[in-house]
Amino acid sequence: MTYPETLGPLTLATGHDTAMAYGELTADFNPIHCDPEFAASSPFGKAICHGTMGLNLAIEAAERSLAPAFALRDVKIRFSRPAPVGETLRAGATLTDAATGTYALWVELPDGTRTTEGTLIAEPVA
Amino acid sequence: MMGPALKDTPWTFADFPVGETMAEVAVDLSAEKAALWSGISGQPAPAAGAPAPRALMVAAMMEAYIRALQPRPPGNVHAGQTLSFHGPAPEVGAVLTARFACRAKEEKKGRRWITLGVEMFEGERKTLSGEILSIWAA
């Protein structure tokens, strides 16, 4: 068995509705995500997506691409740049070390700006 | 269960007790939440009793994190995250216990960095662990 070269990607067209839905899912209605008027006066100047919404899109992409032979084990990321609400997120992972099942995990905007970056380690399913 | 860490005023950087467990809350992986995540991600929702998507576990961790420490100052930034998944995924419908501990805090270049450890259990079995790295607002 060999690890897939690429996990996903999945895309998500974000908007106020997805921000509110993710807020409901996580009980996180921070106005920086869910209140465009408040967010306009923040340092970001506009509402930004929940960081874990993009991360979870990458995790969903990875889990679906890895199954059934492999599974996620570890994830380590940083939220490197804000993703404005209204942008389309593209999330996935790229194999960097086939011996250890290590991937570069990423979430990016349509212009290629990466908003989440890190590593994901997969393992064979026992 | 220890319960959430509740105060009368927002949690500040000075309040975080490094090395101590701060809160425990129960959180469910309900079919309604699975459907909600499915609606956001555009991916099929698992049936009740099927293994929960790992993304649903992470969303539940965030729900637990929000509920575990209240109130909190506006403007906190989630800066980084580590996650380790342990064993098979819990089923949709499972109830997990999330435990939070303050692992570290550091002021650096005018920013207040807090590292919270999180562990999630289904009964006695650990299902997820990790660290939430935040820049605390106050």
Image (tube, coloured by chain):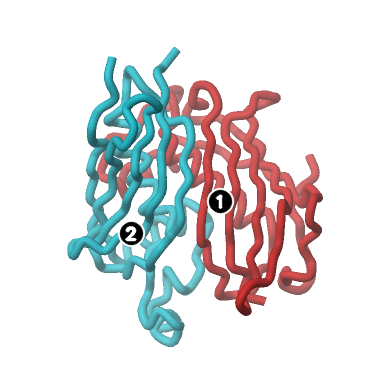
Chain colours: A cyan, B red
Q: Residue at x 28, y 61 (%)?
A: A14
Residue closer to the observer: A27 or A40: A40
Figure quadrant of the N terminus of chain B: top right
Q: Farthest residue in the top direction?
A: A126
A16 vs B108, left or right, is: left
Label 2 close to label 1 by CB (< 8 Å): no
Q: Residue at x 26, y 36 (%)?
A: A7
Dot 2 alpha-carbon crowd within 10 angstroms: few under 14, some 14 to 19, many 20 or more: many
Chain letter, disc 2 residue: A
Residue closer to the observer: B104 or A87: B104
Label 1: which residue? B63
Q: Farthest residue in the left direction?
A: A111
Dot 1 alpha-carbon crowd within 10 angstroms: few under 14, some 14 to 19, many 20 or more: many
Tell me the kind of residue under disc 2. Answer: Thr
Can you give x and y, in whole percent of width and height, for residue A8 in the image? Answer: 24, 39
Which circle marks residue B20 in the picture? none
Q: Residue at x 53, y 35 (%)?
A: B84
Can you give x and y, in whole percent of width and height, for residue B120 in the image? Answer: 63, 36
B79 vs A125, left or right, is: right
Q: Are marks 2 and 1 on the same chain?
A: no
Label 2: which residue? A18
- Distance from label 2 to label 1 (Cα)? 16 Å
Tell me the kind of residue under disc 1. Answer: Glu
Q: Residue at x 73, y 68 (%)?
A: B11
Chain letter, disc 1 residue: B
Residue closer to the observer: A30 or B48: A30
Q: Secondary structure at mark 1?
A: helix
Q: Farthest residue in the bottom direction?
A: A41
Can you give x and y, in whole percent of width and height, for residue A94 in the image? Answer: 27, 40
